Image (tube, rainbow, N blue to C red):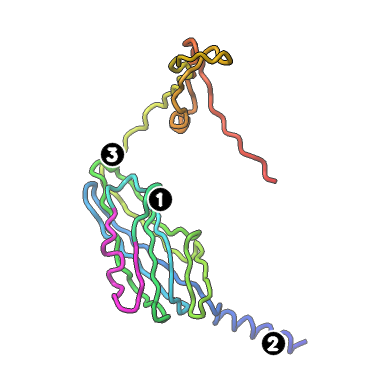
Amino acid sequence: MKSAALTSVMLSIHLFLFPSAHAEPVIEIGSGFVENGTGVEIPILFNNRDDVIGIQFDVVFEPSFFDDVDTSHCLGQISDGGFLAACSRLDWPNRDIVRFVIVSLERQPLPSGQLGHLTFNANPDAESSVVPLDGLSCTGLAIGSELEEIPLTPGDYQAGEIVITGLEPSDPPEPQPANLDLDGELIAGEDPIFRRLLRIENPISILAVGANEMVLTLPGGTQLVATKKQFVPRQG
């Protein structure tokens, strides 16, 4: 009985001192202060804990505060030789993401330290705000020295933020009902099946404006006020 208890204690001590054979890497995103109309450099750091030889990760941010994100120095600390390394801001509709990809061509562990920096240029009309900078764990993936995949989790990212000193936040405008015109434009036709044909503008853009109330203009000019409702499907 004493032997079993001793073995359990020794195993617990071993797991405490050597928690995992495949500890995951950590991405650290820096923070900074910026005035509207100017730029700020945000460092991106990588801590290699498990002989990782390749990694992909995304930095996500709110794009409406920034005119541009300069990625020309995002991998400035990575030497040209022995690595396949690239980073870029993704195209619309993913303009809120900067993607990093780094692979060792010689299957050597990636060096820890600062990878480079991103320069965020705040809009001239940006309001004073705090903009979070974080990593997308759902797209993060590392490759170990044995070519094993190591998914990145939320705990593998240290988030940063940009504090913008700009215009005083304005009060949001009073919500206005959206106008959906179903009266349309009369289309001439001789089809006996349809007594009246109307050309109606695609309503998708009007439905997407976010207004809770909507004025419906029916054929003939009659107007009705409707309220949008959202229905969540049941699980299963």
**Which residue is labeled 2 in the image?**
6
Image coordinates of residue 63 in percent, x first then y, are 35, 48
Residue at screen point 34% across, 56% down? 89
Q: Which amino acid does label 2 sit on?
A: Leu
**SS state under label 3:** loop
Give the spatial CA distance, label 1 vs label 2: 55 Å
Identify the amino acid type marked 3. Answer: Glu
Q: Which image quarter: residue 206?
A: top left
Q: What stretch is highlighted in magenta?
A: 69-87
The numbered dot on residue 94 is: 1
Contact between marks 1 and 2 (CB within 8 A): the answer is: no
Q: Name the residue under label 3.
A: 168
Identify the residue at horizontal 49%, vertical 61% (top origin). 154
Residue 171 percent coordinates (x, y): 35, 32
Answer above or below: position of 225 versus 208: above
Residue at the outermost bottom position: 3
**Above or below: residue 216 compared with residue 13:** above
Residue 33 x %, y %: 27, 55
Q: What residue type is labelled 1?
A: Asn
- Confirm whether the magenta stretch covers residue 74: yes
Q: Quadrant of the N terminus?
A: bottom right
Q: Who's the residue at 55% across and 12% down the image?
A: 195
Q: Is mark 1 on a helix, strand or loop?
A: loop
Above/below status of 114 relative to 130? below
